[in-house]
């Protein structure tokens, strides 16, 4: 886990360094198009990949694994303030087991508001809203799954590479709430920390 967090920090630093390195290059049409008076307003869509780790209450297990999916949203910019909304849907390999007992979180999604501050083509933002997803219990040959609704909050950094393309690094805390499982006779609350990286295309 330490290596994952270190890699995340290095990736964020690399993203932030892109415009600084560009400022040292000779000016020209490409750089003017890329970094001059960047505007975040408009619709966008993209893909992401990352890692999530967390816990399932009343199990003693800590489901974790890689996750990836797609996101889309809209930004509106006024001065340096950027407001908007985003939705995403993720496929997750997060799971943990103890003997024949296994708990997994095979998918989740979010519907969030975003509020950020733009330094030209660099956007720092906070985000939060609704989370939903699935939990699954496997006990030997038996299996039981439920869908749950909860909340999420986090933040991130997005860097515009061109007028249409950007890259981002994002952290979310997800709490899917408790659901009762007949196989275990108790309720289980899924919580997860999600660290992911992605790219967006602006329309």
Image (cartoon, grey):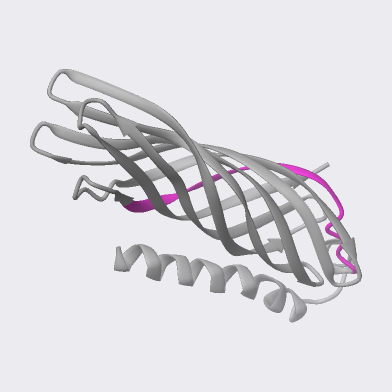
State which region is magenta: 37-54
What residue is rendered at 17% in x and 40% in y?
97
Q: Residue furthest left?
A: 99
Tell which of 128 and 68 is nearer to you: 128
Q: Quadrant of the N terminus?
A: bottom left
- Count all numbered tags in the image, as a single digit: 0
Q: Is residue 195 left or right of residue 129?
A: left
Residue 21 is covered by the magenta coloring: no
> Could you say where residue 197 lies in the image, as x and y percent from the top left?
53, 54
Residue at the far top in the pictured view = 141
- In the rendered image, residue 81, in percent from the top left (x then y), is placed at 83, 69
Picture quadrant where residue 31 is located:
bottom right
Quarter of the image for the C terminus: give it: top right
> Along the line of sight, which residue is nearer the eye, 169 or 99?
99
- At 21% from the left edge and 48% from the top edge, which residue is drawn? 61
Q: Main secondary structure of the magenta part?
A: strand
Image vertical order of residue 50 relative to residue 25, above or below: above
At 24% from the left and 21% from the top, the residue drawn is 143
**Does the segment drawn in magenta span residue 45?**
yes
| Relative vertical location of residue 13 with respect to residue 151 in this rendering, above or below | below
93 sits to left or right of 20:
left
Up-down: is 113 above or below 145?
below
Q: Is 105 situated left or right of 36 in this image?
A: left
Residue 65 appears at what percent x and percent y? 33, 45
Task: Name the residue located 63 percent from the left edge and 49 percent from the top edge.
Answer: 199
Residue 29 locus on image (x, y percent): 90, 63
* Left or right relative to 34: residue 130: left
């Amino acid at each position: 886990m330490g290596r994952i967090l270190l890699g995340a920090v290095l990736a964020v630093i690399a993203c932030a360094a892109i415009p600084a390195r560009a400022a040292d290059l000779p000016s020209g049409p490409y750089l003017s198009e890329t970094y001059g008076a960047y505007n975040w307003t408009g619709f966008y869509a993209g893909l992401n990949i990352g890692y999530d780790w967390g816990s399932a209450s009343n199990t003693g297990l800590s489901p974790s694994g890689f996750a990836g999916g797609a996101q889309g949203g809209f930004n509106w910019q006024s001065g340096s303030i950027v407001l908007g909304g985003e939705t995403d849907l993720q496929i997750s390999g997060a799971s943990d087991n103890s003997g024949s007992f296994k708990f997994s979180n095979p998918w989740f999604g979010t519907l969030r508001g975003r509020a950020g501050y733009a330094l030209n083509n660099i956007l720092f933002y906070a985000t939060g809203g609704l989370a939903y997803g699935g939990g699954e219990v496997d006990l030997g040959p038996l299996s039981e799954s439920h869908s749950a609704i909860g909340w999420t909050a986090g933040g991130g950094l997005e860097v515009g590479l061109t007028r249409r393309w950007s890259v981002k690094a994002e952290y979310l805390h997800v709490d899917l709430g408790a659901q009762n499982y007949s196989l275990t006779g108790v309720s289980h609350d899924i919580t997860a920390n999600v660290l992911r990286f992605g790219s967006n295309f602006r329309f």
